[in-house]
Amino acid sequence: MSKSKEPVYLISVTARLLGVHPRTLRIYEEWGLVTPKRIGNRRFYSEEDLEKLRLITCLTNKVGMSLAGVRLIMQIEEELASHNLDRVFIETLKELLENF
């Protein structure tokens, strides 16, 4: 099932759902890892953004990967998406992380 791209969660709600500080989400945005929808000065995150943020949080907290490493993983995923191989990559990565 595809995750919704509709931006519905404010940064404070998103941070609470992920168990991180809102500043962490701003840092991820500064690094280009996620681009929330902006309405005025407010950031809104979609279900699709939440899925990506969960992966980022897992890679940084559980695996200890740097944001530069996470960005590289995201770039690889985007390249694979252009060849319709991204789902396989993400599922394989999730399986590896579960056993980490």
Image (spheres, rainbow, N blue to C red):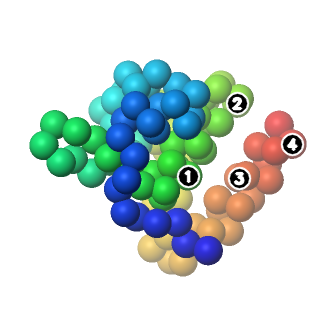
Compared across the picture, whether 75 is left or right of 43 comes to: right
Tag 1: amino acid: Glu
What residue is at 54 percent from the left and 77 percent from the top? 84
First-in-chain label (3 vs 2)? 2
Compared across the picture, whether 12 is left or right of 19 comes to: left
Image quarter of residue 46: bottom left
Is residue 37 visible to the viewer in this orientation of the structure? yes
Image quarter of residue 56: top right
Return the residue nearer the eye: 24 or 6: 6
What residue is at 62 percent from the left and 69 percent from the top? 87
Tag 3: amino acid: Leu
Q: Is residue 41 above or below residue 38?
A: above
Q: Secondary structure at mark 1?
A: helix
Tag in front: 2 or 1 = 1
Which labelled disc corresponds to residue 51?
Answer: 1
Tag in front: 4 or 1 = 1
Q: Name the residue carrying label 4.
A: 99
Return the residue nearer the eye: 5 or 56: 5
Q: CA distance from mark 2 to mark 1?
A: 17 Å
Q: Name the residue carrying label 2.
A: 63
Return the residue nearer the eye: 23 or 6: 6
In the picture as drawn, the residue positioned furthest to the right comes out as 99
What residue is at 48 percent from the left and 58 percent from the top? 48
Q: CA distance from mark 3 to mark 1?
A: 13 Å
Q: Is residue 30 above or below residue 44?
A: above
* Label 2 packing within 10 angstroms: few (<14), some (14-19), many (20+): few
Q: Quadrant of the C terminus?
A: top right
Q: Name the residue carrying label 3.
A: 93
First-in-chain label (4 vs 3)? 3
